[in-house]
Image (cartoon, helix red, strand yellow):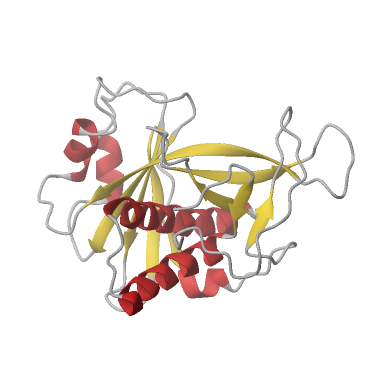
């Protein structure tokens, strides 16, 4: 996987990169490494969540995988801000750290217990403000209401925010997302194909973003750049 802390991705484009990397691996007859598969899955979940945020918050969020040598977080989501000085050639942003945990297709444990055992365990420590994104990797037909999951997380003592994301259609890329801790926010439906059609002010798949104290001008990657293909 290729990484540069200044390069951020349109969420729809990053989903596309993951799909193309998997096709490329099949065509070459070389399976993707476990690290790359993990990065693709985590970035896909984060990108879908960002598309949902765009709809709810009327924003244009960008997504980035964390550096391969970082223990945490898994991904980051950037939202645009104004820089300390007006400069049209130098876009600015701030970001949320996102820790992705996957609730597997064959998992039987209640989701609230799963979260308490994993990311919300007292032994875990994350940077303040980290988002916990629980990706339910299966079509949701029944099971516990997410509002009830929120109620069963009431006894957790954490300053983290927890979101659930899960597929709600057996064939189409339609998902639901909701915050379940510390508050419960009403479910939001995300039609990935429709949300991906939304035009950003900067329509490029990749952008160079600067942060206070770390201003840099570097060239954008060539058109078609895919961080999952080396």
Q: Position of residue 199 (x, y in %)?
A: 68, 69
Residue 11 to residue 152: above or below:
below
Residue 219 to residue 184: above or below:
below
In screen coordinates, is 218 left or right of 54? right
Q: Position of residue 230 (x, y in %)?
A: 46, 60
Name the residue rendered at 62%, 50% in the picture.
7
Residue nearest the viewer, comparing 217 with 206: 217
Residue nearest the viewer, comparing 112 with 92: 92
Residue nearest the viewer, comparing 99 with 218: 218
Q: Position of residue 16 (x, y in %)?
A: 48, 69
In screen coordinates, is 98 left or right of 22? right
Asked where in the image residue 173 lies, by quadrant, the reply is bottom left
Name the residue rendered at 23%, 63% in the picture.
138
Name the residue rendered at 15%, 44% in the picture.
110
Asked where in the image residue 96 lies, by quadrant, the reply is top right
Residue 118 to residue 124: above or below:
below
Residue nearest the viewer, comparing 144 with 219: 219
Q: Position of residue 174 (x, y in %)?
A: 39, 70
């Amino acid at each position: 996987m290729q990484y540069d802390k200044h390069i951020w991705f349109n969420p729809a484009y990053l989903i596309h990169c993951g799909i193309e990397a998997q096709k490329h691996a099949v065509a070459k007859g070389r399976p993707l490494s476990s690290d790359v598969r993990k990065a693709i899955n985590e970035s896909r979940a984060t990108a879908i969540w960002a598309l949902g945020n765009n709809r709810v918050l009327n924003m244009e969020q960008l997504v980035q995988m964390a550096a391969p040598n970082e223990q945490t977080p898994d991904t980051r989501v950037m939202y645009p801000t104004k820089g300390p000085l007006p400069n049209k050639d130098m876009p600015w942003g701030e970001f949320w750290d996102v820790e992705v945990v996957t609730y597997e297709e064959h998992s039987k444990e209640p989701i609230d217990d799963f979260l308490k055992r994993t990311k919300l365990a007292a032994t875990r420590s994350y940077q303040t403000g980290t988002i916990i994104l629980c990706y339910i990797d299966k079509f949701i037909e029944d099971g516990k209401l997410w509002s009830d999951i929120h109620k069963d997380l009431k006894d957790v003592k954490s300053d983290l925010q927890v979101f659930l994301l899960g597929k709600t259609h057996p064939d189409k890329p339609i998902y639901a997302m909701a915050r379940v801790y510390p508050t419960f926010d009403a479910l939001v439906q995300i039609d990935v194909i429709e949300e991906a059609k939304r035009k950003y002010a900067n329509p490029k798949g990749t952008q160079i973003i600067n942060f206070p104290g770390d201003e840099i001008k570097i060239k954008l990657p060539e058109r078609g750049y895919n961080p999952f293909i080396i």
